[in-house]
Image (spheres, rainbow, N blue to C red):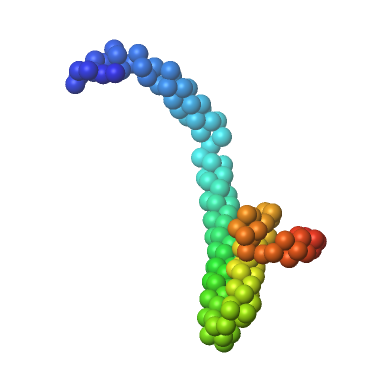
Amino acid sequence: MIVTHRISLTKLLAFTWPRLLVLAVFTALACLVMDQLGRDLLKALSYAAGFLGTALAFLIGFRNNSAYGRWWEGQRIWSRLKYDSRSFALLVQGLIGGAERTASVRKDMLHRQIAFAWWLNRYLRKLPPGAEVESLLAVDELQRAASVPRH
C-alpha cells in the first residue's frame, strides 16, 4: 500500500523493470525485423491483414444477425403461445358454465394447458419435466406424457 503522495523514481523502476525489459526487447526485435525485411513486404502484410480483418468482420456480422433473427423468431413464437394460452383460459372460463360438475372439467383443461407450456419450456431446453408439471397433471397423465419418446 502506498501511503505517500510522491513515488520516487527508484521505487517506480523497482516495480516496473521486468515489464520495461520485455518491452525493450520486443521493440528491438521489431526494429530489427523492419530493417531486415524491408518496408514493402511489411506493407503487403498489413494490406493482407486488413483485407482478412474486414472479411472476418462481415462474416461475424452476418452470423450475429442471423443468430439474432432466430432468437427473435423464437421469442415471437413463445409470446404467441403465452397469448394463446391466456385466450384459451378466458374462453374456457367464459364458455363452460359455473356448475360444480363442470368446474372440475374447466380446472383440468386449464391445468393441462399450463402443464403443456411448462413441459414445452423444459423440453426445448433439453431438460426433464420439472416439479411444477407434477402438481398440474394426474398421475396417469404424467406417466403417459413421460412415455412419449424424446427426439
Q: Is residue 146 above or below residue 79?
A: above
Q: Is residue 21 above or below residue 41?
A: above
Q: Quadrant of residue 77?
A: bottom right
Q: Quadrant of residue 118?
A: bottom right
Q: Report x, y in % for residue 56.
A: 58, 54
Q: Report x, y in % for residue 136.
A: 62, 64
Q: Quadrant of residue 126?
A: bottom right
Q: Residue at x 57, y 75 (%)?
A: 85
Nearest the viewer among 148 and 105 is 105
Nearest the viewer among 83 and 147 is 147
Quadrant (top left, top right, bottom left, bottom right) of the N terminus: top left
Nearest the viewer among 81 and 30 is 81
Left or right: 30 in relation to 10 = right
Q: Report x, y in % for residue 71.
A: 57, 64
Left or right: 146 in relation to 47 = right
Q: Residue at x 63, y 54 (%)?
A: 131
Q: Residue at x 53, y 31 (%)?
A: 33
Residue most extreme to the front: 100
Tell me, yes or no, if residue 51 can be seen here.
no
Q: Residue at x 37, y 19 (%)?
A: 16
Nearest the viewer among 62 and 90 is 90
Q: Is residue 121 above or below residue 103?
A: above
Quadrant (top left, top right, bottom left, bottom right) of the C terminus: bottom right
Q: State the count of labels.
A: 0
Tell me, yes or no, if residue 75 can be seen here.
yes
